[in-house]
Amino acid sequence: MDLLPGDRHADADLAVLADLLAGPLLPAARGLLGCLLHAGGVTVRITEVEAYAGTAGDPASHAYRGRTPRNAVMFGPAGHTYVYFTYGMHWCMNVVTGVEGEASAVLLRAGAVVDGLATARARRPAVRRDVDLARGPARLCSTLGIDRAAYGGYLLGDGPVRLRPPVLPVPAEAVVAGPRVGVTGAHDLPWRFWLDGDPTVSAYRRHVPRTRR
């Protein structure tokens, strides 16, 4: 197992994480909090995530209408990356979860830079506060240098994008759940999870449908 900075876990810990990701969606999403994500010379501690189911009643999911070339990786196996381009300018990254053949994934919404701070700042020179470097899914990818090349990569191996368990377990009382941010469908589902009080967590904005004049 390739260790990340500050990571002292053994192969057994990585196997536990693999089993978690291959299990039900919501426990997998909660379990990603505190995990370490490394790419492009930067490591972040994940502080906020959002869960998305597949075709089973989640209209906000990219897999809601079935398999396409874009979302194919969401159908498994677990532990791979689903990276997509949004608003014509930003990359966002998800961790694929669940049983192979049934689409689900967890969007990585925010993280705290714990290693490679100088590299992170060089990628985002306009950011004034370190807590804002990876605060939001597009900023997280920008800070880590993640783009289309990361699509489909296996996170629990020794590839360029790697996910590792938390250095210390995250207590259940430290995790908060609430509605997802900015989605147009099923926006009130409490499928966003974050570390309570962490300054890197993104601001909540409820979706407001546009009205025609």
Image (cartoon, grey):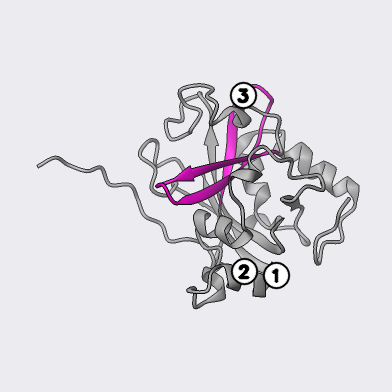
Residue with the most extreme bottom position: 128
Q: Residue 63 in the image: x percent, y percent?
A: 51, 28
Q: Secondary structure at mark 3?
A: loop
User: Magenta stretch?
Assistant: 80-108
- Residue holding disc 3: 102
Check disc 2 and give the amino acid type: Ala
Q: Quadrant of the C terminus?
A: top left
Q: Residue 108 in the image: x percent, y percent?
A: 58, 50
Q: Residue 185 in the image: x percent, y percent?
A: 37, 36
Estimate the spatial distance between the alpha carbons at disc 3 and disc 2, rounded to whole Å.
35 Å
Tag 2–tag 1 contact (CB < 8 Å): yes
Magenta region's main secondary structure? strand
User: As displayed, is residue 78 above or below residue 90?
Assistant: above
- Residue 83 horizontal side relative to residue 156, left or right: left
Q: Is residue 52 magenta?
A: no
Check disc 1 and give the amino acid type: Gly
- Residue holding disc 1: 116
Q: Secondary structure at mark 2?
A: helix
Q: Which mark is residue 120?
A: 2
Q: Quadrant of residue 210?
A: top left
Check disc 3 and give the amino acid type: Glu
Could you classify mark 3 by the number of other residues whose Cα lies within 10 Å: few (under 14), some (14-19), or many (20 or more)? some
N-terminal label among 3 and 2: 3
Q: Secondary structure at mark 1?
A: loop
